[in-house]
Image: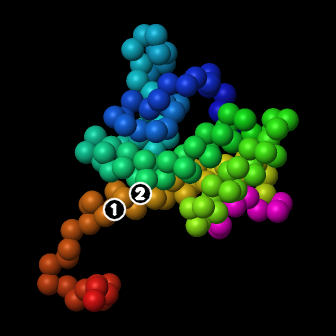
Amino acid sequence: MTDQNTHNRFCEANGCPCFGTMSNSTAGWDHGAKYYCFLHFGCKPGRAHEITNELQRLGWLVKITQTIRARGGERDWDKLEAAAAKEIRLNQSIHLLRGDHESLQKWLYRLEDTLRFACSQARQEEIAVPPQGEEDEKAVQS
Ligand SMILES: [Zn+2]
């Protein structure tokens, strides 16, 4: 996973439910360095809020990725994974369940990719500007 110190400080982005794991400062927490999650790190300031909203909406998934990072492979992992699977089912996202031969690490990456994708969607929606005078074949609103 990461070789950075594990700490339980949250991402600096206001209201973000993720842990802050990335910083462009090497100063460390004690010296004023700001840590961001992998989704807020390097994002444009104007986008931070959208990303936070999306992460809050997907808070259950954020929690699962945090559990895998923190506890993955521990002795009682089977129980934790069962709880995660239950949560995934509750949120009607069975495509996110761990595959039969999927390693824990791969599963974690897949779940984090899902978050990354959701957040990039949120960003695009905000960026999207209707094209002028073009036939909008994509507009399937009824
Ligand atoms: Zn964040």
**In this picture, which residue range is highlighted in magenta?**
94-101
Task: Name the element at disc 2.
Answer: helix
Task: Name the element at disc 1.
Answer: helix
**Mark seen at residue 120:** 2
Residue at the image position 45 percent from the left and 44 percent from the top: 39
Residue at the image position 64 percent from the left and 50 percent from the top: 109
- Callout 2 crowding tier (Cα within 10 Å): few <14, some 14–19, many ≥20: some
Task: State the residue position of label 1.
Answer: 124
Q: Position of residue 135 (x, y in %)?
A: 22, 89
Q: What is the residue that sits farthest to the top in this orientation? A: 30
Name the residue type under label 1: Gln
Q: Quadrant of residue 67?
A: top right
**Mark seen at residue 139:** none
- Callout 1 crowding tier (Cα within 10 Å): few <14, some 14–19, many ≥20: few
Looking at the image, residue 32 sits to the left or right of residue 59; the answer is left
Q: In this rendering, does residue 22 appear at all? A: no
User: In this view of the protein, which residue sits in the foreground, 84 or 66?
Assistant: 84
Q: Quadrant of residue 24?
A: top left
Distance CA(mark 1)–CA(mark 2)? 6 Å
- Tell me if label 1 and label 2 are in contact, CB under 8 Å: yes
